[in-house]
């Protein structure tokens, strides 16, 4: 297997070399360093990996493990980023160094958390009032937030939040207050997820293969 499947980009020196169940049946992840950056990769025998549920979960689990404890900052890559040789990968690290370093700075010490508020079937809800209450509770506790789109008529809120690790406990407590407020009446279901690698707050576009 000569191709390199990329999970994310870290600072040089923050790399890893360990045995782990990885994408495409690989059993090891390691780091390829260049231009003061490192790409966390595993070997794979294709440049177009199929996005199975199992491999998508492995991709996300590896990113979470790399972030665990907050000792390492990583710019996550979306599933399926593969390079057919080390030279191509190093060229991207070199050419994209300014963007990667900005992204590393933006997400350092932070995690992504997700919030959905779902209207129960047949419930009447003041959407604007609900969103205002969410803003009052959460916006000051988050470094940033993005709207993820209301893909269902029952979705009232669908947002991702970038939260400093030191604010995580306060953010969790604020979510608890929202749950107590909204779920008591039985009109809204609160879905709180994470932590995730900060996909929604990284805007680095690179070409592979």
Image (cartoon, rainbow, N blue to C red):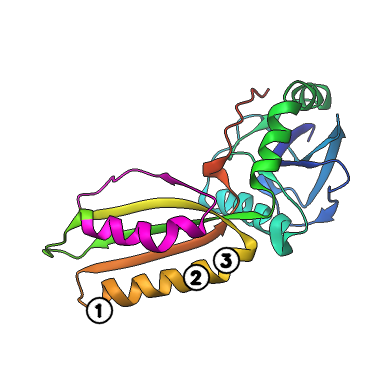
Res. 33 visible in picture: yes
- Residue 141 in percent (x, y) is at 51, 60
Compared to residue 46, the image places residue 162 above or below, namely: below
Q: Is residue 115 left or right of residue 202?
A: left
Q: Residues within 10 Å of mark 1 (few under 14, many from 20)?
A: few
C-beta proximity under 8 Å, tags 1 and 3: no
Task: Using the numbered discs, state the Cα–Cα distance from disc 2 to disc 1 in whole angstroms.
Answer: 18 Å
Given the current orientation, which residue lies at the most extreme right position? 13
The residue singled out by tag 2 in the image is 172
Q: Name the element at disc 3.
A: helix
x then y, percent, for residue 113 = 51, 57
Asked if the residues shown at circle 2 and circle 1 are in contact, with their CB atoms under 8 angstroms apart, the answer is no
In this orientation, does residue 45 appear? no
Residue count near mark 2 (Cα–Cα under 10 Å), binned few <14, some 14–19, many ≥20: some
Residue, x 66% and y 52% (percent of image)?
63
Determine which residue is flagged by label 3.
168
Q: Which residue is found at the position 58% from the left and 40% from the top?
A: 79
Question: Along the horizontal axis of the image, is 139 left or right of 151?
Answer: right
Which residues are drawn in magenta? 129-153
- Asked if the residue at tag 2 contacts the one at tag 3, i.e. Cβ–Cβ closer than 8 Å, the answer is yes
Instruction: Give the Cα distance between marks 3 and 2.
Output: 6 Å
The first of marks 1 and 3 along the sequence is 3
Q: Which residue is mark 1?
A: 184
In the picture, which quadrant includes the C terminus?
A: top right
Q: In 3D space, how far apart are the residues under numbered discs 1 and 3 (Cα atoms)?
A: 24 Å
Looking at the picture, tell me which residue is in the foreground, 178 or 183.
Answer: 178
Residue 137 magenta: yes
Q: Is residue 67 magenta?
A: no
| Whole-percent x, y for residue 66 in the image | 73, 55
Q: Position of residue 21 (x, y in %)?
A: 71, 56
């Amino acid at each position: 297997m000569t191709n390199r499947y990329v999970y994310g980009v870290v600072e040089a020196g923050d790399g890893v070399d360990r045995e782990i169940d990885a994408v495409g049946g690989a059993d090891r992840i390691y780091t390829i360093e260049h231009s003061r950056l490192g790409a966390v990769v595993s070997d794979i025998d294709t440049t177009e990996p199929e996005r199975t549920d199992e491999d998508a979960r492995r991709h996300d689990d590896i990113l979470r493990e790399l972030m665990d404890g907050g000792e390492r900052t990583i710019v996550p890559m979306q599933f399926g980023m593969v390079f057919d040789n080390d030279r191509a990968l190093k060229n991207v690290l070199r050419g994209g160094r300014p963007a990667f370093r900005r992204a590393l700075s933006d997400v350092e010490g932070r995690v992504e958390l997700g919030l959905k508020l779902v209207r129960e079937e047949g419930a009447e809800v003041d959407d604007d009032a609900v969103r205002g209450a969410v803003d009052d509770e959460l916006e000051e506790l988050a470094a940033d937030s993005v709207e993820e789109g209301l893909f269902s008529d029952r979705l009232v809120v669908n947002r991702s939040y970038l939260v400093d690790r030191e604010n995580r406990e306060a953010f969790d407590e604020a979510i608890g207050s929202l749950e107590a407020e909204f779920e008591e009446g039985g009109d809204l279901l609160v879905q709180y997820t994470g932590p995730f690698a900060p996909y929604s707050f990284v805007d680095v576009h690179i070409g592979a293969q």
